[in-house]
Amino acid sequence: MAKIEVGRKAPVFTLKDQDGKAHKLADCAGSPVVLFFYPKDMTSGCTAEACDFSRVEAQVFGVSIMDSKSKRKFADKEGLTYPLLADDALNEAGKPDPKVCQKYGVWVEKSMYGRTYMGIERTTYLIDGDGKVARRWDKVKVPGHAAEVLEAVREL
């Protein structure tokens, strides 16, 4: 699926966090939401990004395909206090089949060293209080990104 364009309604979702608690986008109506998709818990770039988002003044959700147990370990290790959501569905072959990542267009074919595979493209969505995409950042570079998102939140 394609990424969600600015001005469009953000796809609804329900995902469990590091504590097994379900979170719905609808529960955040009336408030800005930062939804950032990252490839993997506890890697250097993802850790830097997750820690930087701790300073953003909005409801923040980090999403990856790692399970809730991995998210708990990540949150504990880094002192993260916002929900890290597990989009960890598997297909019949036991391969990742992340439904929310697909809805948001971030589950893409990647390649490294001549090998192709499916993975998350680091992307951030800012969703306004009406549930519409206010901003989108594609192929995010971590340094300075959270500060840019914070500035966009303040402009809402």
Image (spheres, grey):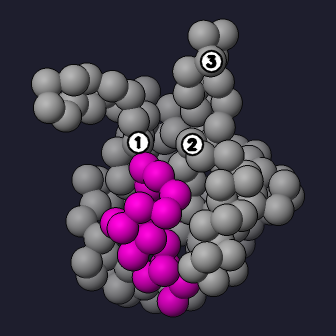
- State which mark lies toward you, 2 or 3: 3
Visible residue check, residue 74: yes
Most extreme residue toward the left is 114
Q: Residue at x 29, y 54 (%)?
A: 138
Q: Is residue 65 magenta?
A: no
Left/right placement of residue 102 relative to residue 16 reads left
Left/right placement of residue 50 relative to residue 146 reads right
Q: Residue at x 61, y 31 (%)?
A: 99
x then y, percent, for residue 40: 47, 52
**Which amino acid type is shown beneath numbered disc 1?**
Ile
Packing grade of label 2 (10 A; few <14, some 14-19, many >=20) is many
| Residue at the spot of label 2 | 65
| Residue at the spot of label 3 | 94
Q: CA distance from mark 2 to mark 3?
A: 13 Å
Visible residue check, residue 152: no
Magenta-highlighted residues: 35-55
Q: Secondary structure at mark 2?
A: loop
Q: Earlier in the sequence, mark 2 or mark 3?
A: 2
- Is the residue under label 1 in contact with that under label 2 (CB below 8 Å)? yes
| Residue at the spot of label 1 | 120
Q: Earlier in the sequence, mark 2 or mark 1?
A: 2
Classify 115 as above or below 131.
Answer: above
x then y, percent, for residue 136: 36, 58
